[in-house]
Image (cartoon, grey):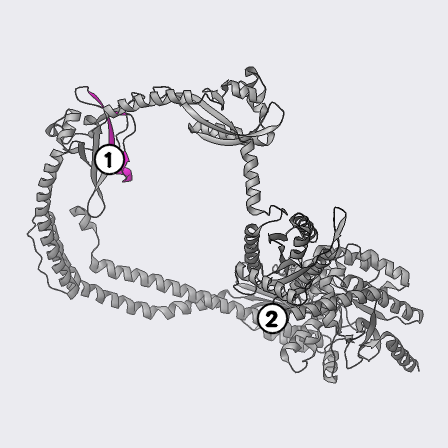
Amino acid sequence: MTEPAMRRTPSLKWSLPLGLAVILLIFAGYTTWMSQNTRFTILTRTAQQDVLDQVSRLARMAEQGLQINPVLVESDLDQISTDPRVEVVLIVDNQGRILLSQRKAWVGLAAKSVLPGFDDGWRLQVIGGRLPQVRMSEDGFRIYGIQPFYLPASSNEVRSSRHGAVFVQMNLEQAWQDARYQAFLSRAPSLAVALLILLAVAALLHLVVARPLHALANAAGRLKEGHLDTRASVRGPLEIVELARDFNSMAQAIEETQRKLINSEERMSITLQSIGDGLIATDTRERITLMNPAAERFTGWKLDEARGRAISDIFMIESALTGLPADIPVKRVLEEGIVLGLANHTVLVARDGTRRDVADSAAPIRNDQGGIEGVVLVFQDVTEQYRMRLALADSEQHYRTLANHGQALIWTAGLDKKCNYFNSVWLRFTGRTLAQEMGDGWAEGVHPDDLDLCFSTYVAAFDARQSFDMEYRLRHASGEYRWILDQGSPRYDSEGRFLGYIGHCLDLTQVKRAEAQVAHLAYHDALSGLPNRVLFQDRLTQAVAAARRTQRFGALIFVDLDNFKRLNDVYGHVLGDAVLKEVASRLKLYLRTEDTVARLGGDEFVVLLPALANQSDGAATLTRAVADKIRIALEGPIVIDGATYYTAASMGVTLFPKGNESVEDLMREADIAMYRAKESGRNVISFFQTDMQHSVTQRYALEQELREAVRQQAFELHLQSQVNAAGQVTGAEALVRWRHPTRGLVAPATFIPLAEESRLILPLGEWVLQQACGVIARLDAGGHSLHIAVNVSPLQFAQANFVARVRDILSVTGADPTHLTLEITEGLLVEHMTETMGRMAELADLGIRFSIDDFGTGYSSLSYLKRLPLYELKIDKSFVQDVPDDPNDVALVETILAMSQHLHLSVVAEGVETVAQFEFLKNRGCTRFQGYYFYRPQAQREWFETFSRNAQVTST
């Protein structure tokens, strides 16, 4: 840095205090700005709340006293207008005319005509919503509030249907100016104290920092001028004294380093004089600083003559291929800092015109800090090597041409990429003439699916002058397509000029067939054609990884034929192999596309069933069903050459994933379970985990019994009455019960989920709907207009023909659709909104009502409440059971009731079991109830008897 530049640099004694002052001012400004923003936010929120309180209070006064005691209302209005923030207070009628105002001249006039800020459309919007609203002007200084109220009823009205409104307008400009002024006053003392402290810091820095550093800077200046014996002597803080000590150590080290550098340069000069390669060094301006004797000999320039001259004047090179001047890599090395080699075929032209082929590299000269101080260029004479290389290239070209004329299909192409030659082997292969193949005619024989890839590979290689290998199908003279390997490479003459491409092709048809056969045998069993152990373990590994990732259970089934060895020994291996093939065929018959069956060897087969279910019980049930099908299939007779043979199989099953088990662990578990099956009497299925096996067996048995019960319609319809606030029955919910011949009455929680999983809910749900419609028809015939609610499964509702089936049932039973309520879940509405809306619209057109069952326990996405034709909500009993004692449930129930009232939806409270619950719900506006406090679920006959008795008592 120059002296003037140093003098322009600000002093530390001033720059540090000034920097601190700037930071302080920025901080003070920021905190003041934040304080003002906070004050304005609080001011605005307080004003908004005050506006809401004022309009609400005045609206209550106006609604209660506008007709009875208007003076009291006017007094309250005047009191509000005393607030200095309040600009306008109005009470307007349903036409927007001013009834009362702090400005008496406005009374009787339209509010929008005297007050530009009054939005009459907003007034109507607020009256429609019946809730107070607050708005703020764009600049934030004005706040408007409107509260609707009922105007006094006229003489012919029981209750007024007309709505007036209270309007209050506040102006916060003066309040904001006062708050901002107070913020500035609160910051002034702290700023004054900070400025005094900064002045003291500046004086202290001058004494203890700036003066010693100035002495140290003078010593550094003398060292820079070349006085290497300079040493600094300063007094001041410990850190500056240590800095001076380090400076003195550095000066001494520089002095010693200079002596060593002089010695090193002398040794380097001796070394450079003795090497045979040319060496030229330059500085960062590309001017020569050093040349060894070899470089002097090659260039014809002496060091004394060349020193200080540009390297382009001394090291003159050109391309041997074009004869044009070549770039000297020195400039690029200086710019990029990398090692570069000279271009191939580079010729050095000496001072006397002598030409030499040279090769080597240029590298940067770096200092200890990694900075580039120059470039060293090392080169050698390779003229003789290039002559030998050229002779070798000519020889290789000659023998390559001879080698390419064998049995291969040969072609050549020129600079235009068009083929200009095909040998006789090619023509015999394709059965076409040379004229037909010339140019792009050969492409007519390429398979259409391979043509684009063939051309793109060839053109890309041609443009890059690169060799290529590609495989494609070429039409043979016989008409079939055969696979060929086409290997192409660029052609050059002895001078290296590009001539085009030459390629030779080999017929790979037999090789492809052999490869396919070998690949199949490597992963498949030769006898059955099934996957072998290697392929199966690979698929099992992938299935286990996928199961851990997706948390879906899969299963592994070991299948071992019972007494197969005896059959093999008696009838021979030929028959045994035939039986194994038939077994393999039957195993594949009962599996999904994603399942795998493999033969491990002998009479052992293994089946992989991935991604069966999300729960282990469900996966085990499905596995048991598949294993049963396999067992039954293998029990069937096997007919071979007119003779009948019988076989059976023992099967071991394990599920995954259970932990960190490996593929080998799963194979071993299934194998152990299979042997347990053999020990249990053969031709049985055994699960590896005993507890799971018992559970699966029970579940599977229950499913089979449930399937039989559905087939025989062995169910009962129960009804639980729904009542109004007076306790009168207004309807009922249809419930299904399964009376098992040995288990007794099975709870719905046990068999309904199983029916859902097995899709038995479809016929079961239709049966319940038929029975419920029969109840409706019977009630209609007796002159009772009661609504019967039926739960509809999401699976049932999703059926494409659900609407048609409901129409058919209504038609057959003669039930009035307006007395039928279908209860659906929130999950059905959210997950299948489009389909659900369409089906609900069709059913609603028939008069059927819809109820949201267990409202609040599902997705609770309230957007569907206004989009769907809903009639009622059912409050889940989990919310009802703890009211009125649990404040959380109280809040939830009150919210649901208030929302339903606003949306004009009926509400049914489920699970009402105490008088306290009933009284709480009734007092909160609930009108329909269901629970043990009123009626328990009753069988259909018993329910009709109870209803008839109650109806007689009511009529009496």
Residue at the outermost top position: 435
Where's residue 282, x and y in %?
18, 35
Where's residue 478, x and y in %?
62, 24
The one nearer the camera, 643 or 18, is: 643
Q: Label 2, secondary structure: give it.
A: helix
Where's residue 594, x and y in %?
63, 52
Q: Which mark is residue 362?
A: 1
Q: Earlier in the sequence, mark 1 or mark 2?
A: 2
Marks 1 and 2: which is nearer the front? Answer: 1
Q: Residue at 56%, 47% (x, y): give it.
A: 523
Alpha carbon separation for disc pair 1 and 2: 83 Å
Within the magenta stretch, is there residue 928? no
The one nearer the camera, 947 or 139, is: 947
Stretch of the chain drawn in magenta: 332-360
Residue at the outermost bottom position: 915
State the count of labels. Answer: 2
What's the residue type where badge 2 is placed?
Answer: Leu
Residue that carries the numbered disc 2 in the rendered image? 52
Q: Is residue 797 left or right of residue 955?
A: left
Q: Residue at 72%, 58% (x, y): give it.
A: 629
Q: In this view, does 210 lie to the left or right of 755?
A: left
Within the magenta stretch, is there residue 355? yes
Number of residues whose C-alpha sits closer than 10 Å to that of mark 1, classed few (under 14), some (14–19) or many (20 or more): many
Q: Is residue 73 above or below residue 288?
A: below
What's the residue type where badge 1 is placed?
Answer: Ala
